């Protein structure tokens, strides 16, 4: 069953580059509605918990340091087929391999500092949205 919500973060590199507005514009123009949104910063501990799924990967330490290095924008997004369509909109993890016109192709600096997060499944979209937002913060 495809649910209609996904979760995203605008990562520290894109916030630092003043790309919040440009990325949100692309998200809205692609037909996603913003259900919840927060401008915040992850502690190293919170980043470690959020990315626990990647604990065994060689870049885990680098990822946790990077994701707690500056503020981020977290959001829940709504659209039919949200998870898959958002992955298409953001493009490949490595921006040098991302399709033209994708958010990562336009805004990402590197495979680590790749501008945006997008959930990889309905189950993780739910878990990740719950990590940041209470029921009262969703509209
Ligand atoms: P995704 O964000 O496209 O789903 P994942 O494989 O889930 O990619 O990796 C999570 C995040 O970890 C990536 O978005 C990126 O920030 C970082 N990452 C992935 N692969 C590498 C790597 O090879 N070196 C450094 N960082 C990486
Ligand atoms: Mg992933």
Image (spheres, rainbow, N blue to C red):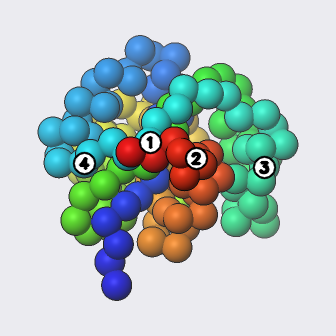
Mark pair 2, 4: CA separation:
18 Å
Q: Do the residues labelled 2 and 1 touch (CB within 8 Å)?
A: yes
Mark 3 vs mark 2: give the one in front: 2
Mark pair 3, 4: CA separation:
28 Å
Q: Is mark 1 on a helix, strand or loop?
A: strand
Q: Which residue is the site of mark 4?
A: 32
How packed mark 2 is, by other alpha carbons closer than 10 Å (few <14, some 14-19, many 20 or more), is some
Q: Are marks 1 and 4 in contact (CB under 8 Å)?
A: no
Mark pair 1, 4: CA separation:
12 Å
Q: Which residue is the site of mark 2?
A: 133
Q: Which residue is the site of mark 1?
A: 36
Mark pair 2, 1: CA separation:
7 Å
- Mark closer to the chain start, 1 or 3: 1
Q: Does the residue labelled 2 lie within 8 Å of ligand 2?
A: no
Quarter containing the N terminus = bottom left
How packed mark 3 is, by other alpha carbons closer than 10 Å (few <14, some 14-19, many 20 or more), is many
Q: Nearer the viewer, residue 106 or 122?
A: 122
Q: Do the residues labelled 2 and 4 touch (CB within 8 Å)?
A: no
x, y percent for residue 136: 53, 45
Q: Residue shown at 70%/65% (left/top)?
A: 53
- Mark closer to the chain start, 2 or 1: 1
- Mark closer to the chain start, 3 or 2: 3
Mark 1 vs mark 4: give the one in front: 1
x, y percent for residue 69: 70, 26
**Residue 107 can be seen in this image:** yes
Residue 39 vs 133, above or below: the answer is above
Q: Which residue is the site of mark 3?
A: 48
Mark 1 vs mark 3: give the one in front: 1
């Amino acid at each position: 069953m495809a649910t209609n919500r996904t979760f995203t973060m605008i990562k520290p590199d894109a916030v630092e580059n003043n790309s919040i507005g440009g990325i949100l514009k692309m998200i809205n123009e692609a037909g996603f509605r913003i259900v919840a949104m927060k401008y915040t910063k992850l502690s190293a501990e919170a980043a470690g918990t959020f990315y626990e799924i990647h604990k065994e990967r060689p870049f885990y330490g680098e990822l946790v340091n990077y994701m707690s290095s500056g503020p981020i924008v977290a959001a829940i997004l709504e659209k039919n087929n949200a998870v898959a369509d958002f992955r298409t909109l953001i493009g490949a993890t490595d921006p040098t391999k991302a399709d033209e016109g994708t958010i990562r192709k336009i805004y990402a600096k590197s495979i680590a500092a790749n501008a945006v997060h997008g959930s990889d499944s309905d189950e993780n979209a739910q878990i990740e949205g719950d990590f940041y937002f209470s029921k009262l913060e969703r509209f």
